[in-house]
Image (spheres, helix red, strand yellow):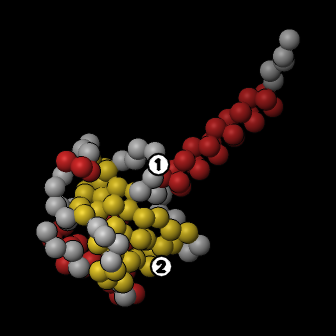
Amino acid sequence: MCKINKHTITIKALVLLISVCLTLCASGCASGGPVTGVTVLSADFQVIKVLSPEEIKLFEQHWERKSMVDVHLRDVGGRHYKLDISHKGSGNRWLYQSTGYVQVLSVQVKHVYKIQDEESFNKLIGATK
């Protein structure tokens, strides 16, 4: 028979906590630190724009205000873009619709977010509706 003590429970809780943290980091929801680069790609992977350091600061302001929504990215319309967002030592590709909806590219199903001011954001990243 297996004995369970405080030490075993503490280790299991720690493993669970680490697991949750890794999942959040992998999902792209955690910021990963300041944004160091943003490249905007068209649906056919042509570079539309590489943001300057000044534009990255504006980008971060928009990015921090995005909110989770309950929609499927395929249902929101608009033109399709890819955003390659770099952080110090890491990065993610996000799928962006010019209607202001964004989702991290992943094998697993991930949340969809809405950019609050998509017109200003689209102008910043060079996207057209």
Q: Is residue 7 left or right of residue 45?
A: right
Q: Is residue 77 left or right of residue 80?
A: left
Residue name at image x 55 percent, y 69 percent: 90
Is disc 2 placed on a helix, strand or loop?
strand
- Image coordinates for residue 61, horizontal then vertical, percent: 32, 72
Three-letter code, disc 1: Val
Residue 107 circle label: 1
Q: Is residue 65 left or right of residue 9?
A: left
Residue 36 circle label: 2
State which quadrant residue 39 falls in: bottom left
Q: Quadrant of the N terminus?
A: top right
- Image coordinates for residue 15, horizontal then vertical, percent: 69, 40
Q: Quadrant of the C terminus?
A: bottom left
State which quadrant residue 80 falls in: bottom left
Q: Is residue 121 visible to the viewer in this orientation of the structure?
A: yes
Give the total number of marks visible in the rendering: 2
* Front disc: 2 or 1: 1
Label 2 crowding class (10 Å Cα cut-off): few <14, some 14-19, many 20+? some
Residue name at image x 23 percent, y 79 percent: 126
Residue 128 circle label: none
Which of the marked residues, 2 or 1, is nearer the chain's N terminus?
2
Q: Is residue 116 visible to the viewer in this orientation of the structure?
A: no
Q: CA distance from mark 2 to mark 1?
A: 24 Å
Whether pointer 2 and pointer 1 mark residues with C-beta atoms closer than 8 Å, the reply is no
Q: Nearer the viewer, residue 61 or 119?
A: 119
State which quadrant residue 104 falls in: bottom left
Three-letter code, disc 2: Thr
Is disc 1 placed on a helix, strand or loop?
loop
Residue name at image x 74 percent, y 29 percent: 9
